[in-house]
Image (cartoon, rainbow, N blue to C red):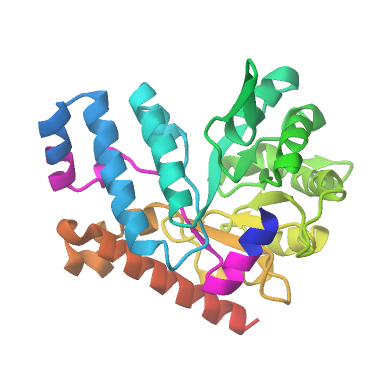
Amino acid sequence: MIDQLVEKIKKTNAPIEVGLDPMLAYVPDHIKEKAYKELGETLEGAAEAVWQFNKGIVDATYDLIPAVKPQIAMYEQFGIPGLMTFKKTVDYCHEKGLLVIGDIKRGDIGSTSGAYATGHLGKVTVGSKSYYGFNEDFVTINPYMGTDSVQPFIDVAIPEKKGMFILTKTSNPSSGEFQDRLVDGRPLYELVAEKVVEWGAQHMGKCGYSYVGAVVGATYPEMGAVLRKLMPKTYILVPGYGAQGAKGSDLVHYFNEDGLGAIVNSSRGIIAAYKQEKYAKFGPENFADASRQAVIDMQQDIAEAIGRK
C-alpha cells in the first residue's frame, strides 16, 4: 500500500489526508434532524447522521486527495451502531478509490496485538473460510510496549502489503512529558525513530519508502526536521495542521527533496470547515462544498511551502 499511497500523492499533487473524525457537534442540524426522524434520538440515529455527514464529505473531496483517516474513537462512542458506521465508511472510501488509514492507536502485546492487527489489517479464519474485519490499508500504532506491540502488526500487514504509522513525536501539548525525556542524553522520540527505521528496514516498497511509517506532529517543526533526517526512507504522517495551529510553512522539513515523504492530516479543519468564518458563506446546507474548498486551500498552502524549500 505504500507504493499506492505514493502513486496517489503524485497523481493528486496533494500529500493530504482528510481526518474523518466526526463529532455530532460538527454534523449540520438538517442531517441530524432527518436521521433522528427516521431512527429516533438513539445510537442508531446518531450513527446514521455521522454516516450521511461522512458520505457528503467523501463525495465532495475524493477526487482531490489520496487518503482518509477515520479515528475509530469517534465511532466507538456510539457503540455497535457507531462501529457499523466506521466499517461502512471504510468500505465506501475504498469504493471511491481512497486509501484508508485507520487511526486506532493500538499498543498491546502478543496474541492481543495480533488480534488487533488481524481485525484491522488482515483476515480472521472461521472454519474453512477467512474474512476481513475492518480492512483498512494502514493503521496507527502506539509503540510504548516495545517490539512486542509492533511485530504482530508487521507479521499481519506485510503479507497483505499493508502498512502502519508508529507514534513517534505527537502533536499534543503534553507529549513532551515522556517523548522529550532524555535517555542516554537523547530525547526518547529520537530513539523511537531509530526503532521505526529498524522495524521497517526489511519491508520496503518499490517507491523506496518503508511500509512502516511514523507519526510526527506538525506542531513541533524543529523536531520534525531532526526526525526527517533520522528516517529518510520512512513516510511520515503529520497531524496538527489547521485546527491545531500548524500551517504549510511549518511542514517544509517533513518532506524530502523529492517532495515526497510526508502526508498531512487535517480533521475538523476540513470536515467542520463550514463553521469557520472563512467558509461561512457556504452555510450548513453546503457543508461538503466548504470541505472541498478547505482541501483546495490546504493543497495550495502546502504546495507553495514545499516549492519554497
- Image spot of residue 290 (x, y percent): 28, 64
Q: Is residue 21 magenta?
A: yes
Is residue 256 in sight in this rendering?
Answer: yes
At 67% from the left and 45% from the top, the residue drawn is: 162
**What residue is rendered at 69% in x and 50% in y?**
214
The picture places residue 293, in percent across and down from the top left corner, at 33, 70
In-front residue for pair 120/173: 120
Position of 22 relative to 245 (above/below): above
When the figure is inspected, residue 119 is found, relative to residue 13, above or below; the finding is above
Q: x, y percentage for residue 195?
A: 83, 44
Location of residue 306 in the rendering, given as x and y in whole percent from the top left corner: 60, 78
State how many labels appear: 0
Residue name at image x 65 percent, y 19 percent: 128
- Quadrant assignment, res 33: top left
Q: Which residue lies furthest to the top in this view?
A: 127
Image quadrant for the C terminus? bottom right
Q: Can residue 20 be seen in this view?
A: no
Residue 41: name its quadrant: top left
Q: In this view, does 203 lie to the left or right of 38?
A: right
**Magenta stretch contains residue 31:** yes
Q: Spot the residue most to the bottom.
A: 308
- Residue 207 appears left or right of 100: right
On screen, residue 165 versus residue 273, left or right, reads: right
Task: In the rendered view, tell whether residue 126 sits above or below residue 246.
Answer: above
Q: Which of 292 and 303 is in front in this view?
A: 292
Q: Give the range drawn in magenta.
A: 7-33
